[in-house]
Image (tube, rainbow, N blue to C red):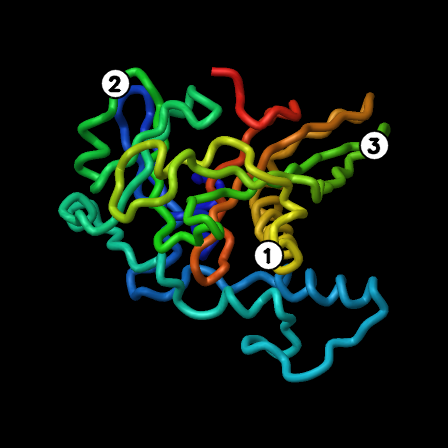
Amino acid sequence: AENLNGTYALMPPTFTVEADGTWSGLLCSGLDETGRPVESLPTVFESTERAKRADAGEEKGGEEAEGPEGAGDVVASFFGKHFLMDVPTDRESLEADETKRWFVKDSTRNYGTGIMVAKSVEEARSSLKVGDKYVIQLAVEPQLLDGEGYKFACRVYLVAYSPPNSLSIEFYTYPEGWITRAQTPWAPGSLEWQFNVSRDRHSRLTEWDLYDEMYPKFGAQIARVLQRVQKKLVVKMERPSFELFGVDFIIDTERHPWLAEINRSPRQLEEVSPSR
């Protein structure tokens, strides 16, 4: 979240809390003090769709999507002030606001454990234990539900590979990711874990009816992340190396992908539910 601060409509507004109880400012809020986006949309959104058409030997027909001249379809849903960015950035207003829900994540836990849902920042604060590190993240609402009324998330696998005797890093995404979903169909207003946390694997990402539309958007969002962190990546020239990441997205009802988190060494076994 700290590396992505100053981006627009990439990660939901987020706080980080250190082990000594120190809170960060609100990160990834996406708006400046005037309510305008803090960044211009990067050209990666244009190039993703253009490259796709070029590879296929096709030219785009019909009317162009709204936005910068020549922008492709992938760009369209990212324009304008996004509804999730309507969140106060000052601490006093955030503490008093009980209209938005926040995920409280213990950063030392995994597999969807150590997560609770709070109805306000104040309630989230009261649930923390000194000595642990936390991420406090605004819930994506309204969130897109699956056809059976469950909340779900999309897991995309990302590989970073550095060839031998090279300072370059190549990045690849794997299309056979997963749809993970909550254990119980969504009940509006619920704060309970089983309604809100999408942990267990449900189906392959390629089986999803929105796959063709959303997968290029996932790639565009991942490219924005890599642009932000590339200067911090370290390459060891003496040998080839790689790193595998699990990238989790939440989709809103406008079909906009929000980055929830990126995990190192993600679970790779084929079982549906992790060991408890």
Tell whether label 1 touches label 3 (CB within 8 Å): no
Residue at mark 2: 130
Q: Residue at x 58, y 67 (%)?
A: 75
The quarter of the rendered structure image containing the N terminus is: top left
Q: Residue at x 26, y 41 (%)?
A: 190
Q: Quadrant of residue 171?
A: top right
* SS type, badge 2: loop
Tell whether label 3 touches label 2 (CB within 8 Å): no
In the depicted view, which residue is nearer to us: 209 or 61? 209
Sequence order check: which comes first, mark 2 or mark 3?
2
Looking at the rendered structure, which numbered label has been put on residue 153? none
Looking at the rendered structure, which numbered label has been put on residue 163? 3
Residue at mark 1: 210
In the depicted view, which residue is nearer to us: 137 or 113? 113
Give the image location of residue 165, x and y in percent: 86, 29
Q: Residue at x 47, y 23 (%)?
A: 110
Tell me the kind of residue under disc 2: Val
* SS type, badge 1: loop
Tell me the kind of residue under disc 3: Pro
